[in-house]
Structures are given as C-alpha cells and as structure tokens.
Image (cartoon, rainbow, N blue to C red):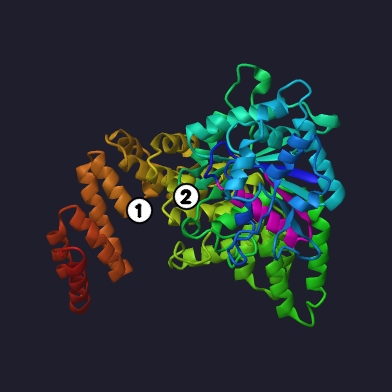
Amino acid sequence: METITFYSYKGGAGRTLALANIARYLARLGKSVFTIDFDLEAPGLHYKLNLNERGEPIPIQSGLVDYILTFVTCGKPPQRLTDYVATVPGSAVSGATIWLLPAGDVPSADYWRKLSQINWHELFYTTGAKGVSLFLDLKERIAAEYSPDFLLIDSRTGITEVGGVATTVLPDKVVCLVLNNRENLDGARAVLRSIKRTVPIDNRPPIQIVVALTRIPQGLASEEELLEAAKKVLNAEAENLIDTLSVEDMFVLHSEPELQVTECLRIGGDKSPDDSPLLRDYLRLFIRVIPKEAIAPQIGVLIGEANALVLEEPDNTGKALEELAYSSGHPDAYRALLKFYRLRKEWGAAVLAARRLWELTSEPDMLLWEVARRDLAAQSELFSTGRSVTGHPQFKYRWVLEMWRSGGASDSSTGERLADLLAEDDRESEAADVLLQVIAAGTISPKLIAKVVRYLITAKRLVEAKRLLDRFEQEYAQDAELSEAWAMYALSQPDAAEARRLVASKVAMDSLSTRSLYRVCVLAGEKHRAEQVLDIAFNKAVRRGPEALVDLGRLYAEAGRADEFGELIRRTLPDEMREKILRTMQSLVWR
C-alpha cells in the first residue's frame, strides 16, 4: 500500500482538488484507493470527491474525529473501522473502489463539539502519549481490512500535530503544493525541512518529496523564471547544512478561470488534455508521483484490448486508444496511440499526440523524432511559400526545440529549420541561439554564419555578431551572403569605422548587392563611389528588365535622386516599357 500525503502550507493552493483528481485517476486504472481527510479544522474532501456526480457532498455520519475521540475516551480505538468509512459514489471502475475516511459529520455543531474535546497536547506530548501509535495502527487496519493499492491523505495546512503525523509519520511520499509568494515558500520550506529530518520508521526509505507551484496563469512568459526563483527560496542554505533542501524538479499546476466559477474534477470530466492545461499538469504530476510499475500492467492490458481489433474495426481502435491516452496520461498509452496514427498516416493527430507524449516524459525516441521531423517539414513548407506559420493551428515548435536540445543539438538540419521558424515568429534572438548550438556541434558554412549574424544583429546582440564575423572573416570573406551580413553589421553601427573597413576589403565589396554597396559607401563617406555604384547598377538593371529597374528606382529615391532616375528612364527605354516603369515608380517611390 503506497501512502501519499498532499500538503500545503496555506489554503487555496488546490491541494484537496488535486488529491480528488488523483484518486479518480487511480480508480480509472483499476487501482483501489483509500482516502483520509486529515484537515480537521477545514474539512472538505467529501465535497471534492463527488464533484462529477450530482454535485452533492458524500453523506457522512462519522469520521476521523469520532475515531480519535473514541480512542481518547475509551483508551482504545473502535472495534469496527467500517462504521467510519464511506464509499465514494460511482468510483468503481475495473473492480476498483475509492473509500473515504472523512473528518466527520461536517458542518454540524456536534462535529465541532467533538473536535474541541480532543486534547492534542495530551495525545502527543505527555509521558506515554499514544498519538503516533494510534495513527500507525489506523494505517495498519486500513491495509488489513481494505487492502487498497493506495492510501491518499489530505493533510492539515500550517504546522500542527495532526499535520505532522500526516506528513512525517504515515507517508511514503509528500506532494507539497505551494503558492508563488514568499509567505508560502518560506512556510513550505520549514515543513519540508522537518520532513527531511524525520527518522524513517521500521527502516522504511526516506520520505520522497514532490513540489508543485500552483495557480500559475497559463502562457506566462516568465514561468521559467518563477520556477527558478521558487526553487532558490526552497533550496536556501539552512543554519544546519544537513537540513538544506535540494528541490531539483518543480511541477506547475496552471490556473483555469472556469474552475474559479464552478469546481469540477478534470479526471473523468468532459475535457481532454488538449482543452485543459490543468489536466495536462495533473497527468504529468501523477506520472511522477505514482510508481510506473504500479499501473503499467493495467495499461498494457487495455492497450492490448484496443489493438486486438485494429484490422477489423480501426475506428473503434482509435477511439479506444484516444480515450485511454487522455484519461490515463500514461506514456505507453500515448505511444500506442502515436503508432496507430502513424499506421493510418494521420499526421496532424500524430503531432498532437507526440507533443503530449514529450510533455509527459521528456524522453526522445525514434517514434517521436519521426513525427517531429514531419511536423517541422510541414512548417518549413509553409515558411518557404511565404504563408503564415504562426497562424497555422498545428504550429507548436517548442516541443521539438526542447527535444532537439535534449538530444545534444547534433542534428544540424533540424536546428536550421527550427531557427527559421523562430525567426518567422519574430524570435531572432532564440533563432541565433539555436544556430550557435549548431555551430558549436561542428556544422559550419558561410551561409550558416551569415544567417546567425543577421539574427544576432536583429536581436541587438552586436558584440556577438562582431565576434563571429571576425572569426570567419578570412575564410569566408569572398562569400556573398557573409559579405552581406558584414554590411548589415556595418550599417548597424553608430559610426563609420566598420563601414570604412569593409570598403577597404575589395573581395568583400565585390560580393555585395547594389543596395548594400551603396549604403556602405555612403556611411563610409565615399560619396563619389556611391554615385558610381548607382550609375553602374542602372546599366545592369536595363539589361535585366523592368523588375530590376523598379527595385533600383527605390534606391535612387532613397539617395534623393528620384527625378534623375526618371530622366534616365525617359532617355533610355522604349516608350511602352518606360511608361509602365514610371507608373509603377509613381505608386511605389513618389507616393
């Protein structure tokens, strides 16, 4: 029997709702669950466990307070535990049941009278106090009489005697839900340090601690910074160094405005993980909290049952696998669903399933990479044709970027595609970082250097752009794209020093486009040479045709020589072509 306590230092963190959801989750996977409401001063687990039924609280006659009071008054626990336990309606799935040992008959006056009669100091701190043994015996009775797979405890907030039992005496794991403010973080840190100091009973392993930051708005740009700041507070050095925490991973439970109006369970509700950020968060958390070996066999059986009819009834197989993946959130279920989509060549659905699988596991494999590369290829196709990428409903490159980095950033073609998509999304700084990783992994070319320099300049990271240009100046100075990147850097400078240095490099200057060459000459103070550039370009543009002339006309206008350009057109071109170009120029240049 795995025992998991849910704790929060203050109320409002969503602790009880999270416990109710994990109870439903386990029951849907065929695991029997026993729950205890230890929050005796503000009990409510019997409300949360029944949210998806008729919305009424589970009828309660007696509970933990009555159980404790009988022990206090009679010197021994009640004979029948069943008198204090309720069965959660509609919980039986695949033979599984959720049982509840509630706090008591809340909110009756009789409950509060009974609670006030319990002397907690006498129960825990006097000579020969038997409070700890009472609760250890209760745990043993639950295991013997109900044989649940999991015991879930909803702990009292703050620092209390009964809360200490729930967090240090009974559990194998503690899930600590923390609101993002200093009061909650400091209080949680104190409690977690006390849990760490706890000497395990009967040579049990140390209590495992899992921390989740809760009520975080969805889509917050600073989420990573919030997590790092919260971990820094929790892991602050203790006066006694042995008490210092080492929280490495921290989960996030996002807020959902809908739940602030009407509470409901996300597990077994009408929302899929694609519709509910909190459901996705719960599934990630539960996979971490629940031992894989505890539910893997049941998942395997359900996958086998769904796949048995894949040839005769493929549509039903798909629906069964989708339901299993969405309800369990188990990686094996998503992997089976992904294989089904690949078999049916349903790549749009496969991308969504792959994204969810990556969010759950953060473990890249060949199947995920296959779908990721197909997704990137589709996005690159949109990019290359000039259509909107960011507006495309499937455009979610973040998961591929994370997977690429976790794999060592060694796939250069994937890295370049990711950089292009990031730049298309106006994230040139991130695009530059991706390409710098590609270069660091050993892939170097003039085209790649030029591209990363352009991204760095756009992102105002000019020192890094200059460093990269200097590094490759000699090797690639004759390359047109790299020369253009050098010109772009020179034109971004407030003075003419870099422009003069570029003008002095004949090889680089010969590779520049007319527009860049003209602008660099102007910045370098080479006015006569700049005028020559335009004159030479005009003769070339006449040979190339109207489109080249229109483009050059813009540059003449930029130079303040628009009228001169018009006169050149009139003297040089046939009537029909001249009039067409002048009309275009009037709309584009002189408007």
Residue 114, percent from left and from top: 64, 41
Mark drawn on residue 513:
1
Camera sees residue 483: no
Residue 27, percent from left and from top: 74, 59
- Disc 1 residue type (three-letter): Ser
Residue labelled with disc 2 = 217
- Disc 2 residue type (three-letter): Pro
Crowd around label 2: few <14 · some 14–19 · many ≥20 (10 Å): some
Residue 113, percent from left and from top: 60, 41
**Left or right: residue 494 compared with residue 265:** left
Question: Mark 2 or mark 1: which comes first in sequence?
Answer: 2
Q: For the point 70% across and 54% down, which residue is it?
A: 23
Magenta stretch: give its range.
Answer: 14-37
Q: Is residue 21 magenta?
A: yes
Task: Give the structural element (helix, strand or loop) at label 1.
Answer: loop
**Left or right: residue 491 compared with residue 51:** left
- Residue at the top extreme, as displayed: 239
Tell me how far mark 2 sits from mark 1, CA to CA: 48 Å
Looking at the picture, tell me which residue is in the foreground, 477 or 310.
310
**Left or right: residue 129 compared with residue 408:** right
Q: For the point 26% across and 60% down, which residue is it?
A: 552
Q: For the point 31% across and 37% down, which residue is it?
A: 493
Question: For the image shown, how many numbered marks are present on the structure?
Answer: 2
Camera sees residue 579: yes
> Quarter-wise, where is residue 327 in the image?
bottom right
Q: Which is more foreground, mark 2 or mark 1?
A: 2
Residue 541, percent from left and from top: 29, 64
Evaluate if marks 2 and 1 touch, with contact meaning CB atoms under 8 Å apart. no
